[in-house]
Each structure stands twice: as structure tokens, then as C-alpha cells.
Image (cartoon, grey):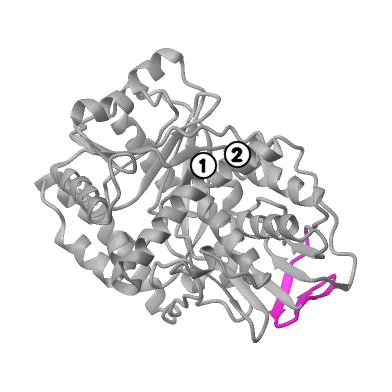
Amino acid sequence: MTPRDLSLWLATADDDLSPRPTLPGDRDVDVAIVGAGYTGLWTAYYLAVADPSLRIAVLEKEFAGYGASGRNGGWCSALFPTSLSALARRHGRDAAVAMQRALYATVDEVGRVVATEGIDCHWRKGGTIVLARTPAQLARARAEVDDAREFGFGEDDLALLGPAEARSRCAASQVLGGTYTAHCAAIHPARLVRGLARAVERRGVRIYERTPVLALRPGQVVTAAGTVRAPIVVRATEGYTPTLPGHRRALAPIYSLMIATEPLPEAVWQEIGLAERETFADYRHLIIYGQRTADGRLAFGGRGAPYHFRSRVRPEYDREPAVFAALRRTLTDLFPVLGPHLRITHTWGGPLGVPRDWFPSVGLDRTTGLAWAGGYVGDGVSTTNLAGRTLADLIRGEESDLTSLPWVGHRSPRWEPEPLRWLGINAGLRVMASADAAEARSGRPSRRARLFGRLIGR
């Protein structure tokens, strides 16, 4: 399998994906970053911009954008996996509001850097529409808007749509209503990560690819090619974190899979909508997500792939034929105009990083010099930018509005040992799938899904 086989996005990246040099031997730097995805590269970018004198090295097992950064759904959104209410319960109302406003601002910050650095990632800030297609889903849409109003967010942040308004943006089947937020841009994720890698290199950051990390310790990163010594070591490995020694239970790698259609005729797009390239989903429990690509495809994904015992991450897990078939059925159910002869040109997947409490975090332990960011639960395209800016402030010892946000310094509990982890995560996936089926039959919100949400602190 070649790098271009890993996703639609890498297949259509704007460079040749030629590998960068491997670490040539021992090195001394100021900041060593493990992982050349969005988190690691944004951190390097803001550090290099703030202090060009810093010696920064990024170490990557494969190549820049190999992981979720080159395979995700392409939503640069203000989503956070922990709800406003849950944030407020843990940290207070003001902290919850500050976190959400920081996420809103982050979408525009990514757009600013994309424009400044000339990164052609097909940026289009068309917002997100989330459809309600059952009475239970409509109830959740209304509850989400009510929650937003309780925290002072208005129509410009999240609007409740009637059936006609929702269909005017996304003419899916069985639409009863939905919500719309302007705080999201559709992007080509691989073009963003590859462009960001080039941007940090222009600022003197060294990226070493094909350099697997064997151990991550205070003051050093050990690889087969040599040891990088640095007072600050940043872990930015997201769904691949469990492959690092001593981190198997830090995050659970949950797989999300995607399919992409051939470019669709304009007549089909006239029926589907998404004229502003809105990203789209619905209010089912087992998450789906999609976008209209710049070249006229539907790129569509969802959860449902199993968690693998002992948090194993392997290339063969990126492809689950049963999940791809389910995604195709869901896509044609949403948009019957696609018909039974729809051609799927690309299928792919990869692991997300999920903390035990579904709460992403960013931080720096000043006693050890070890820093980290991650656990985005699939909401990382823009959140990684916020993490990178926050880490840059923390590393440079700058107190700012970002360093006081509630996810800074948060420590999620470790996942349970096996087989409890395997049983619990896969049971949760089955609960959500069965809850959607029950709601489709009855029209009533699922009690089992509500209970599961409480168990994970949402």
C-alpha cells in the first residue's frame, strides 16, 4: 500500500509525499515534538513564529499527515466532545463559555493562517447543518439550542431550523428540522497538514520522518536512529499514543471510517443542496459526518468499527467492509437521488484518540518538561490549533487567556485494563447503534443512550 492509498485526501494531496530524511543521529534541541500531525505541527508553528531562535525538532514514525490529520472528515469546526453543561459542572459557567468562545475564534485563526501561508486546502467556511430526521432527534436539536441559549450563545452561533429551512441547505430524506452554525469550514485535510509542514520548515523547524520513537522520557526522545535531547518534550500522537511504552491505557484508539463518491453531476447537487459546502450530520447517536468536496464528491464517514483488544493499532483495521457497506446504505438513505448505482471511489479509515472521560486536554509538567495534547474524540481539526497555541504559551512561560482554559492541565483517568476495556467500549458502540434503531421505530428518545452518556460524563 502506498501513501496515496491511505485516503481520498492523501490521494489528492498537493505534493508528491516524498519522505523527508530520517533522524541522522543524536541531536540537542530546545523542543522535541513526537508526531507530525496537526497537533505537533501547530505547536511547532506557533513556537517558531513567537521565537525564531528556538531549535525545534519534530519526530514522525511515518510521514507528516500519516494519521488522522491526513484521513479525517475535513471539518474545521468549533466542536468539543464535552458539552457546555458538563464543562460548567466541572469548571464553572464562565470557564465553559470561555472554552466555547475560544473554539469559535480558533476556526477563524486556522483560516487566517491558511491565507497567510498560502495553503491551498480548499477552505470554505460554509458552516455545519445537523439534521433531525426522527422526533427523538428533533428533541435533541431543540435541547442543544436551549443549552446554547442558557450559556448566552445566540442565533448567530447556533440556530434551530424548521423542516423547510433545513432542507434548503441539505435536502436529505425525512427531514423534520435541524440546527445550523456558521462556525465551521470544510477543508481538504491532507492539503492542510502537508502545507503546514512546509510552513514550519520555512521557519527552520526540522521534521524527521521514518523515525519511530522507542521511548519518551524527561529530557529525551529515544529512537532507533539516535536520541534527541531537549528540556521540553511534547507528546502529540493522538490515536497512536497507546503504541508508546507506558501509554497503552492513556487513550483508546477508536476507529472512524470513510467513503467518497465519484464527482457528482451538477443536477444531483441541485437536488442535494450543500451549495455553500456546508458540512453535515444528523442527530443519531452513532455519529455520521460528511462534506461536499471542492471537486464535487460526497466524502462521508461514521463510527461503528470495533475497538481492538489491548488498544492495538494496525493498518488492516483501517478497512472494515461491513462498515463501508453500512456507510453506503446510510448515504443513499440520506440522499435517495444517488440511486443504487452510486460509485464509491475511495474507502479508508484510522484511529481516533479517546480519553476515558471524553475530555481532551493540553498541558506541561514543568517538573519533568513533558508536555502533551490530545484526546480530541474526532473533533481535532481546529482543536489541534488551539492546543498548539496553548502549548506554545505554556512552553514559553506566557500566561494568557489560552493557558487559563479549563482543558489546560486536565488529567483524564486511565482506561480500564483488558478485557474490561474491550468489553466496555464495544458494548458502548452496540448500545448507541441499538438506540438509533429503537428511536427510528418508536420516535422516542432512548433511555439506554441517555444512561450511557451519563456514564461517560457527557
Residue bearing the label numbered 2: 9
Per the image, the residue denoted by label 1 is 74
Eye-nearest disc, 2 or 1: 1
- Residue at 70% x, 74% y is 233
* Picture quadrant where residue 412 is located: bottom left
**Magenta stretch: dominant secondary structure:** strand
Residue at image position (29%, 23%) is 168
Badge 1 element: loop
Question: Which class describes the residues within 10 Å of circle 2: few (<14), some (14-19), or many (20+)?
Answer: many
Identify the residue at image location x=25%, y=61%: 431
Q: Do the residues bearing badges 2 and 1 touch, measured as CB atoms within 8 Å?
A: yes
Question: Which residue is at the front of the view, 267 or 118?
Answer: 118
Give the amino acid type for the residue marked by disc 1 in the picture. Gly
Q: Earlier in the sequence, mark 2 or mark 1?
A: 2
Q: Which residues are magenta?
A: 210-230
Q: Secondary structure at mark 2?
A: helix
Residue 444 visible in the shown view:
yes
Could you say where residue 111 lies in the image, as x and y percent from the top left? Answer: 57, 40
